[in-house]
Amino acid sequence: MVYTAPNLSAIVGSVVDAKLLGSVGGLSKFVKMPDDTVRHLGTKSTNLASFSRASSQRDVGYLGETEIYQSTHPYFKKYVLKKLASRAVFAGRIDWLKTDFTGETGRTYRKEILNKIVKRQEPPGCRSFVLLKENL
């Protein structure tokens, strides 16, 4: 899939790239999908009547198999899934238009996602209080 969609492969990996494009029916149909639909590709609907849903990953499809998603803290996984889906669609559109054959745009998007994850995990900065002058 590196030759067909190098930018998409740079973000999600070749295996997940092949699963995404195979389940949709090709790159031309993939680029017409909204990112919310891409996020749910490959999900399995299970009926867990009277069973615990605590350990099941319900809204995770093929994008849940990516290295970025697997290495993320569980608190940020939903955020990462949204970012992966949106950037995967953008990278697919770049591949469909054949504007970047090297995959450099996909690697840039991957670094951008990783930087946003690191930025989100930072603790919030402390507030600085400004003393007001007293009216004399």
Image (cartoon, grey):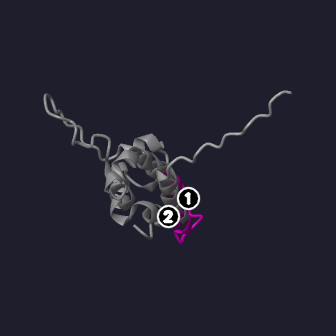
Quadrant of the image occupied by residue 105: bottom right
The residue carrying pointer 2 sits among few (fewer than 14), some (14 to 19) or many (20 or more) residues within 10 Å by Cα, namely many
Total marks in image: 2
Q: Name the residue under label 2.
A: 7
The residue most toward the right is 136
* Residue ID at (54%, 70%): 101
Amino acid type indicated by mark 1: Ile
Left or right: where does residue 109 sit relative to residue 43?
right
* Residue ID at (19%, 37%): 46
Q: Does dot 2 land on a helix, a strand or a loop?
A: helix
Determine whether 131 is above or below 83 in the image: above
Badge number at residue 115: none
* Residue ID at (44%, 45%): 79
Quadrant of the image occupied by residue 128: top right
* Residue ID at (71%, 39%): 130
The residue carrying pointer 1 sits among few (fewer than 14), some (14 to 19) or many (20 or more) residues within 10 Å by Cα, namely many
Bounds of the magenta span? Answer: 89-107
Left or right: where does residue 13 sit relative to residue 126?
left
Q: Where is residue 129 in the image (x, y as percent from the top left)?
A: 67, 40
Q: Does dot 1 land on a helix, a strand or a loop?
A: helix
Is 96 in the magenta?
A: yes
Near-viewer residue (128 or 111): 128
Q: In which quarter of the image is the N terminus?
A: bottom left
Q: Mark 1 points at which residue?
A: 94
Measure the C-alpha gap from mark 1 to mark 2: 7 Å
Q: Where is residue 39 in the image (x, y as percent from the top left)?
A: 39, 45
Q: Position of residue 45 (x, y in %)?
A: 23, 37
Residues at discs 1 and 2 in contact (Cβ within 8 Å): yes
Q: Position of residue 115 (x, y in %)?
A: 52, 59
Which mark sits nearer the N-terminus, 1 or 2?
A: 2
